Image (cartoon, coloured by chain):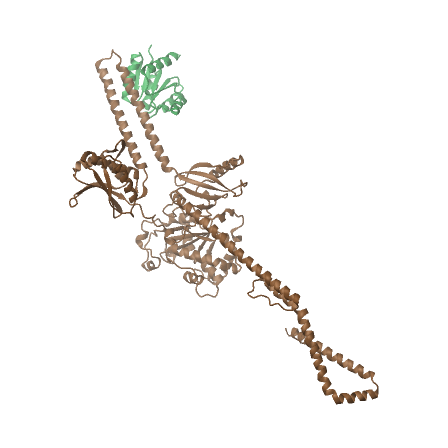
């Protein structure tokens, strides 16, 4: 630094020194050319006017230097300065423009540079706007797709060619719950989830076979090839799957990128059908036998030589078989009526719609007017509208026929968890015997008749039916007690924790994902799938008999928290829960009563966590509890484990606290519902996601690096 | 000499007719009311022909038929399966386990008598 300064001073002084030297040498040379008298004249002249000559000489020198400086600045120094300014603008945006300086050409150049910079800025802004618009459009389209999928009543699962799930809908989620062998535990979440393998549900060979069939059809030029297979699942359910290929979007791109599975659970259908089949079969065989006996006996009776005793025996056979046949047919009729009754599904219907449909239906009956009384327009009923309308119409028809009623009214009011649907008339009452008859007889409206009775219809709805008389208003009515449609599906854990956004049931980025051959350690943290979990326990010492009372977990796939794919389960610890802990975890002893024990919960959690990296806050604590159960449950958690406590310590070594709440606050994670296992797991997951970019900034990209960094922190050296 | 015919059926209402029919046709008639009884009767009495029902307690007609065919001494016994099981697959199974003929209920008694006579006549 000092050396450079010295150089600079030297450079600055050099021209002056040179000038002085030049003047000195010139003066000496001039002096040498003069002879003595001339020297004396000059000395006298210098003596006389030297005081004037020196300042003039110095002044001339200064003027010359100034002029040289100006010329230098304008023509020599301005060009490199402009270059520097231009270079700065190549590297990044600057708020102000270059001030033109130097020669006219340089000034023009500066102005051109300014203009180019302006154009570039404009271009960048346009580009950013277009990108923003495009991504907004994509978001909208995705939102629309998600909405569409969630409305579908059929189960849809989309997979890439590796069988990884890219998309599924609400219906599929519900269906997989039914397929789960641990339905009360993971609720199917261990089977379905983004990035999970469909081979957890279906045999790989089965899917491969269907894929082959489709490939073959594609090659033969089929435009819409599909394949179908039926399979039984581990839980003993019968599933029919229809597979359609996902092809490239380009018109000539026939290559398959993945497949769509549409699933039907046909277990019930199949059982019903085989029951019907059996019924029919038994009926056919029974009838054949009876008819055989009958025919043989009748033909024997043709024998004229037969004695009376024998003849009577044959007649006995005929009476007997005829009776058996009648009974058999009666049984069949009853069974199929029951079948009819159980087969009808109940649907959600707006009560007011049902009333107006019923009014129209009744108005069609000859000589009968119908009107509506009080009708609660907000009521949703869960009904089979077809049979219920028939019941109302048949009752109204009988009122008109047998009691000459000309006008009826319909009323619909709420009654606790049910609704009252009343068929009201003014006029004669009837005996309870008549009501019983009307209730039990098959329904009939004009030419239309049904094997069902009003009672059957009511039973089908799990409701009630009775007859009442209001003396004050002189009104009589039949009352149907009907179930209301539940306002919404029961809140499940996922909806409870996170209700403010549409479920993330899809992630098409996973289309690219292929089974990696890299060891997990070399994989970037952002690419991995994680199970973030937390346990609540009776105390802090697993080795001294403390037990897990709750496990909560959620998943991170493709760098996003999948709130809907969560696991929450209370566990019966088979011991008391110390009162001291209850305010912390909020698990009361009666809450765990009747819950599954750890032997059942841990295998389900193990399935839920398969193929993922485990993440927990202070993971050593939770892992210790899991490991102590290995022998008893036979379940080993061998996957890598990351600890948000250690990662936080690695990123912020100087912070005092690495408690979950402190980290959450530091990283700007809102804490909701802490100290339930699932609530804590959610917070941990969000913290983990916020830690990822910080880890990257600290040069920690891969799982291996993260594990190494964790081990180096102070906290890692403290044994739990 | 008249042939011995065994009627193996658990339903008295058909046994009475079959017994009457066979006797009237001049055969010596034996009756068994379940599969086991039928096997025992065949071993003991060596009937020439069995009218065999499929659905019987203890042993089904299929079982009885298979046992007869597996036994060197008894495999010559003629078997006419007479049953309410009328599906193609049932008939195939009956003939598959070794029945010589198969008749589905209900049947015309005349046809049955003709069939039995035919089978016994054709027999050596």
The N terminus of chain A: image quadrant? bottom right
- Left or right: where A296 falls relative to A434: right
- Estimate the x, y position of residue A4 in percent, counting from the top left: 65, 73
The C terminus of chain A: image quadrant? bottom left
* A592 is higher (above) or lower (below) than B60: below
Chain letter for the green colouring in the rendering: B
Residue depicted at x 36% and y 32%:
A274
Of residues A118 and A336, the one nearer the viewer is: A118
Q: Decide if residue A491 is in sight here.
A: yes
- Estimate the x, y position of residue A582 in percent, counting from the top left: 33, 58
* B9 is higher (above) or lower (below) than A624: above
- Left or right: where A18 falls relative to A38: left
Chain A rendering hue:
brown
Q: Decide if residue A460 is in sight here.
A: no
Q: In which quarter of the image is residue A312?
A: top left
- Estimate the x, y position of residue A472 in percent, counting from the top left: 15, 46
* A490 is higher (above) or lower (below) than B103: below
Of residues B87 and A596, the one nearer the viewer is: B87
């Amino acid at each position: 630094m000092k050396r450079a300064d010295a150089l600079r001073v030297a450079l600055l002084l050099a021209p002056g020194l040179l000038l002085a030297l030049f003047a000195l040498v010139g003066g000496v040379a001039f002096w040498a050319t003069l002879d003595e008298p001339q020297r004396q004249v000059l000395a006298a002249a210098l003596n006389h006017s030297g005081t004037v000559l020196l300042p003039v000489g110095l002044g001339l020198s200064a003027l010359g230097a100034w002029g040289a400086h100006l010329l230098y600045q304008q023509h020599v120094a301005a060009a490199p300065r402009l270059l520097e300014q231009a270079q700065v603008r190549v590297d990044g945006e600057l708020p102000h423009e270059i001030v033109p300086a130097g020669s006219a050409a340089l000034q023009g150049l500066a102005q051109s540079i300014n203009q180019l910079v302006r154009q570039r800025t404009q271009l960048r802004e346009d580009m950013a706007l277009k990108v923003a618009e495009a991504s907004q459009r994509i978001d909208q389209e995705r939102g629309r797709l998600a909405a569409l999928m969630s409305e579908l009543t059929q189960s849809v699962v989309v997979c890439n060619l590796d069988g990884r799930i890219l998309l599924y809908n609400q219906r599929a989620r519900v269906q997989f719950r039914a397929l789960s062998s641990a339905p009360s535990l993971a609720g199917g979440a261990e089977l379905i989830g983004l990035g999970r393998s469909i081979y957890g549900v279906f045999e790989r060979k089965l899917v491969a076979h269907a894929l082959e069939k489709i490939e073959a059809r594609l090659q033969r030029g089929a435009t819409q090839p599909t394949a179908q297979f039926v399979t039984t699942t581990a839980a003993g359910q019968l599933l029919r799957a229809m597979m359609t290929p996902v092809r490239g979007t380009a018109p000539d791109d026939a290559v398959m990128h993945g497949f769509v599975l549409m699933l039907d659970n046909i277990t019930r259908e199949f059982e019903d059908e085989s029951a019907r089949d059996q019924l029919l079969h038994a009926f056919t065989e029974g009838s054949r036998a009876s008819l055989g006996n009958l025919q043989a006996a009748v033909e024997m009776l043709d024998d004229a030589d037969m004695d009376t005793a024998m003849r009577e025996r044959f007649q006995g056979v005929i009476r007997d078989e005829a009776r058996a046949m009648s009974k058999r047919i009666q049984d069949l009729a009853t069974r199929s009526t029951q079948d009819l009754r159980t087969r009808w599904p109940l649907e959600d219907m707006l009560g007011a719609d049902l009333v107006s449909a019923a009014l129209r239906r009744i108005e069609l009956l000859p000589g009968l007017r119908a009107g509506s009384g009080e009708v609660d327009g907000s009521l949703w009923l869960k009904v089979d509208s077809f049979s219920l309308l028939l019941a109302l119409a048949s009752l109204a028809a009988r009122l008109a026929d047998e009691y000459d009623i000309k006008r009826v009214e319909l009323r619909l009011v709420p009654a606790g968890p049910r609704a009252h649907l009343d068929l009201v008339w003014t006029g004669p009452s009837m005996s309870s015997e008549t009501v019983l008859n009307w209730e039990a007889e098959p329904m009939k409206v004009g030419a239309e008749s049904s094997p069902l009775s009003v009672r059957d219809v009511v039973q089908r709805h799990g409701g009630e039916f009775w007859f009442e008389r209001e003396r004050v208003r002189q009104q009589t009515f039949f009352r149907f007690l009907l179930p209301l449609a539940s306002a919404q599906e029961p809140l499940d854990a996922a909806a409870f924790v996170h209700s403010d956004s549409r479920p993330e049931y899809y992630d098409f980025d996973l289309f690219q994902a292929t089974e990696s051959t890299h060891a997990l350690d070399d994989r970037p943290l952002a690419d991995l799938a994680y199970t973030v979990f937390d346990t609540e326990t009776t105390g802090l010492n697993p080795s001294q008999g403390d037990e897990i009372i709750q496990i909560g977990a959620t998943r991170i796939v493709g760098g996003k928290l999948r709130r809907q794919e969560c696991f929450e389960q209370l566990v019966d610890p088979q011991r008391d829960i110390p009162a001291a802990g209850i305010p912390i975890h909020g698990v009361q002893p009666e809450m765990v009563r009747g819950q599954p024990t750890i032997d059942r919960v841990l295998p389900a959690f193990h399935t839920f966590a398969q193929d993922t990296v485990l993440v927990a806050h202070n993971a050593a604590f939770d892992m210790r509890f899991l490991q102590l159960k290995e022998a008893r449950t036979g379940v080993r958690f061998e996957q890598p484990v990351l600890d948000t406590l250690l990662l936080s310590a690695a990123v912020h070594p100087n912070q005092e606290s690495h408690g979950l709440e402190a980290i959450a606050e530091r990283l700007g994670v809102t804490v909701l519902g802490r100290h339930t296992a699932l609530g804590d797991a959610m917070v941990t997951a969000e913290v983990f996601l916020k830690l990822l970019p910080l880890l990257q900034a600290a040069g920690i990209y891969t799982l291996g690096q993260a594990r190494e960094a964790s081990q180096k922190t102070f906290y890692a050296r403290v044994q739990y | 000499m008249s042939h011995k015919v065994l009627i193996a059926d658990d339903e008295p209402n058909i046994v009475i007719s079959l017994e009457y029919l066979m006797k009237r046709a001049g055969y010596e008639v034996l009756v068994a009311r379940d599969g086991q009884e039928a096997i025992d009767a065949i071993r003991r009495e060596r009937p020439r022909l069995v009218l065999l029902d499929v659905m019987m307690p203890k042993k089904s007609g299929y079982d009885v038929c298979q046992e007869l065919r597996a036994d060197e001494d008894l495999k010559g016994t003629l078997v006419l399966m007479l049953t309410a099981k009328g599906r193609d697959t049932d008939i195939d199974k009956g003939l598959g386990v070794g029945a010589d003929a198969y008749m589905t209920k209900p049947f015309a008694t005349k046809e049955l008598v003709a069939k039995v006579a035919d089978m016994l006549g054709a027999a050596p």
